[in-house]
Amino acid sequence: MKLNEIRDNEGATKNRMRVGRGIGSGKGKTGGRGVKGQKARTGVSIKGFEGGQMPLHRRLPKRGFNNIHAHDLNEVNLGRVQAAVDAGKLDASAPVTVDALVKAGIIARARDGVKLLGVGELTAKLSFEVTRASKSAVEAVEKAGGSVTTTFAAGVAHRGTSDSAVASA
């Protein structure tokens, strides 16, 4: 075999269909678009249109509320953190941050932050730096001799209060 003899396998490549190239091509005249009408023209996008009838997406009732200001937090239980410390994935001497939790494989990605929850037993003395923490989680960490500092993301802390109220608090 020589370099000039190298070629694709038979049937591996296929030429594209050239439409509108004469009646003998089989895809001539209307080019596979049928005849006349809006959909036969170019640049038509009528998704959801039902010929003047009220479209399905407008007939069905809407339910619920989508909060555009909501933050997508990872929820981490103390039991999972303790298991990671026991397995040697998490360093007990370093502060437990979002990056440390991702590196240890406790959470997949950072998202908008982490909320620490109090489910499970914590025996290691750890210092947490998380976005939020439940009261039971804070009590359990302090009982084990650790500390919790919550660092709210911008716009999350004191939502619905004025700046002067936040400054005086």
Image (tube, helix red, strand yellow):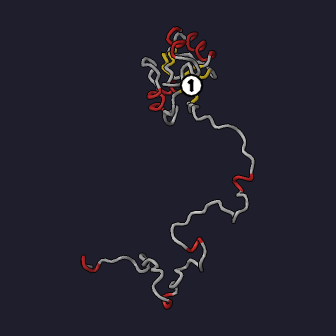
Residue 127 image point, x, y percent: 48, 16
What amino acid is found at the position of numbered circle 1 in the picture?
Lys
Badge 1, how many Cα within 10 Å: few under 14, some, many 20+? Answer: some
Which quadrant is home to the N terminus?
bottom left
Residue at the spot of label 1 = 115
Tell which of 63 and 30 is nearer to you.
30
Tell which of 95 and 91 is nearer to you.
95
Residue at 47 percent across and 27 percent down: it is: 98
Vertical arrangement, residue 44 with respect to residue 117, above or below: below
Residue 123 image point, x, y percent: 56, 16
Q: From the viewer's perspective, tell me whether residue 98 is left or right of residue 115.
A: left
Residue at 24 percent across and 76 percent down: it is: 3
Residue 58 image point, x, y percent: 71, 52
Residue 2 image point, x, y percent: 24, 78
**Residue situated furthest bottom in the rendering:** 24
Location of residue 78 by image quarter:
top right
Residue at 45 percent across and 85 percent down: it is: 21
Q: Is residue 78 visible?
A: no
Vertical arrangement, residue 163 with respect to residue 110, above or below: above
Q: From the viewer's perspective, tell me whether residue 19 is left or right of residue 116.
A: left
Q: Is residue 107 visible?
A: yes
Residue at 54 percent across and 24 percent down: it is: 156
